[in-house]
Image (cartoon, grey):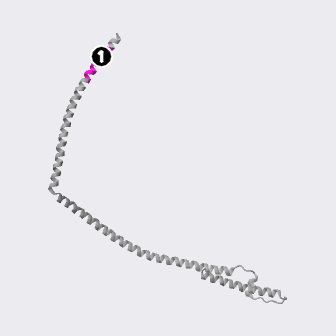
């Protein structure tokens, strides 16, 4: 239990005990034979009844203290974490900048290394590789030329055949037309 709350509860209990004692004294005086009783001004309000004003005052004070403590805690934590994370953010940005610079340097060096490697490979391959590649390409080109000539010869032969077949087709169509005409003549007779 919260020590402040415990203290406030004990204080309220003491006040209640004091009021109860005063009430008991008042009831004892009233039970005694009627004489002129002078009631003190501070006890007069007890006769009217308890409305809990002293409890509300203590609760209000404790509530205000509680709210103030919460606000102070929130403000303190906000300031603490702001400072802490501001420092972390600065460190992060610095490290990020360094990493970007390192990445750019590495990328640049990698590009230079690739260029040098390509030059070295070409230099090592030299003329022998290029000549062997040239002779291979030349052989393939000659083979393709021969295939092309063979295909052109085949195309020429096939074109001649097509022309002959077209002539035969025309002749057959004309013969077919003559025969149909003859059949029609014979049928009409």
Outermost residue toward the top in this view: 189
Q: Is residue 129 left or right of residue 4?
A: left
Q: Is residue 166 magenta?
A: no
Q: Is residue 56 left or right of residue 134?
A: right
Locate residue 11, reporting x and y percent: 66, 84
Question: Main structural element of the magenta stretch: helix, strand or loop?
Answer: helix
Pointer 1 residue = 179
Q: Is residue 137 above or below residue 163?
A: below
Quadrant of the frame with the C terminus? top left
Locate residue 131, reporting x and y percent: 15, 52
Locate residue 130, reporting x and y percent: 16, 53
Q: Is residue 178 magenta?
A: yes
> Looking at the image, which is closer to me, 133 or 27?
133
> Looking at the image, which is closer to me, 31 or 145?
145
Which residues lie in the magenta part? 169-183
Residue drawn 24% across and 64% down?
113
Residue drawn 34% across and 70% down?
97
Residue drawn 44% across and 76% down?
84
Q: Is residue 54 above or below residue 35?
A: above
């Amino acid at each position: 239990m919260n020590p402040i709350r415990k203290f406030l509860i004990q204080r309220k209990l003491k006040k209640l005990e004091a009021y109860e004692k005063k009430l008991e004294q008042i009831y004892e005086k009233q039970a005694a034979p009627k004489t002129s009783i002078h009631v003190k001004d501070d006890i007069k309000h007890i006769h009217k009844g308890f409305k809990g004003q002293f409890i509300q005052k203590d609760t209000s004070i404790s509530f205000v203290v509680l709210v103030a403590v919460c606000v102070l805690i929130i403000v303190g934590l906000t300031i603490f974490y702001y400072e802490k994370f501001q420092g972390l953010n600065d460190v992060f940005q610095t490290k990020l900048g360094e990493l970007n610079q390192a990445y750019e340097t590495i990328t640049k060096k990698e590009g230079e290394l690739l260029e040098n490697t390509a030059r070295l490979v070409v230099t090592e391959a030299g003329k022998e590789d290029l000549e062997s590649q040239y002779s291979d390409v030349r052989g393939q080109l000659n083979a393709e030329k021969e295939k092309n000539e063979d295909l052109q010869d085949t195309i020429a032969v096939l074109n001649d055949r097509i022309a002959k077949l077209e002539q035969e087709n025309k002749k057959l169509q004309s013969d077919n037309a003559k025969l149909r005409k003859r059949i029609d003549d014979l049928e009409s007779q």
